Image (spheres, grey):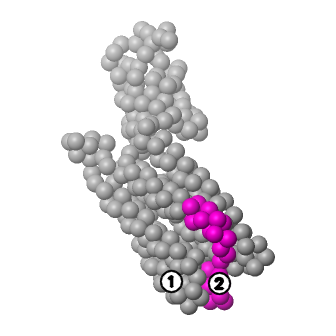
Amino acid sequence: MKRKRAGYLEGIISIVVNIILFGLKYWAGIVSGSVALLADAWHTLTDSVSSIIVILGMRLSGKKADQKHPFGHGRWEQVSSILIAALLAMIAFNFLMESIELYKEHKAANFGTVAIVVTIASILAKEGMAQYAFYLEKKSGNKAVKADGWHHRSDALSSLLVLAGIFLGNYFWWIDSLLGVLISLLLLYAVYQILKESVDSILGHRPSPELIEEIKTLIEDYEQRDLLPHHFLLHEYGNHRELTFHIKVRGDCSIDYAHEIATRVEKLIKQEMDISATIHLEPYEAQ
């Protein structure tokens, strides 16, 4: 599945589902008089904001390369992921502060039967959306979609907090506050994971050992000569990947012959793996 299509598909479905869930939660909050459920409803609505960010990211990242941006605009995906992570961080921080405040004021959750039904439906729907987003990310490699999936899961976890308060609140008045703190820490860890992956991609990194081995095997099977590829670096621009690495060749090779080898290998990697490679040649004797 193409990255752009995955972003649009997940984003549009997410917006529709979130608006429906927002209406149900808000109605249940009014009927039951639950402040926590009303807050959870607004939390659900923030998912629509993150989905809009995903769609805008896909729109911007789909622009073709130009003179100022020769590698395209694919890194808008990483920028979108960082924006979603920032939104998640704010939600997690608010959860943390609210939980501490509830504990200080000795307040317990107050829910009714309607809230139970709506909360359970919300948990199932939001976790289903999270799993769908993670599935699309695996198929397309779109990191912004994965980040939005974590946002869906954050809403499922917040609804789980509400549900826990329903069943345990009568026995332990402080359970709502405790679960709030734990879920806030879990969300902050999700923020860390999203930021780490996005920033790592922007800065550039070594390819995975599996990818390096695949490239080495491809070169060895095609060239049938003693070439020693090493020093691999990978830069990702959405669905466009730039790979640089070194190849050691015999010192008595002519410049033309060495250039011919490099060109063949670059074309091979582009054809078989859709990666744009740039190769630095050096003699075996070089350190």
Q: Secondary structure at mark 2?
A: loop
Q: Main secondary structure of the magenta part?
A: helix
Is 12 placed left or right of 211 in the picture? left
Name the disc covering residue 241, or none: none
| Residue range of the region highlighted in magenta in the rendering | 95-120
Is 7 placed left or right of 137 in the picture? left
Q: Considering depth in this image, is 46 or 79 the residue closer to the camera?
A: 46
Instruction: Point out residue 89 in the picture as x, y percentages from the top left corner.
Output: 50, 56
Name the disc covering residue 26, or none: 1
Q: Is residue 110 above or below residue 194?
A: below
Q: Toward which corner of the image does residue 277 lie, by quadrant?
A: top left
Badge 1: residue crowd in 10 Å (few <14, some 14–19, many ≥20): many
Instruction: Point out residue 52 in the picture as x, y percentages from the top left corner.
Output: 38, 67
Nearer to us of marks 2 and 1 is 2
Is 129 placed left or right of 267 in the picture? right
Q: Considering depth in this image, is 168 or 108 the residue closer to the camera?
A: 108
Q: Is 99 inside the magenta-drawn segment?
A: yes
- Residue visible at 75% across and 75% down in the picture: 168
| Mark 2 to mark 1 CA distance (whole Å) | 13 Å
Tell me the residue that label 2 is attached to.
Answer: 111
- Residue visible at 53% across and 58% down in the picture: 93
Q: Inspect the image, locate mark 1, and give the three-letter code of the amino acid beneath it.
A: Tyr
Q: Is residue 260 above or below residue 60?
A: above
Q: Is 232 inside the magenta-drawn segment?
A: no
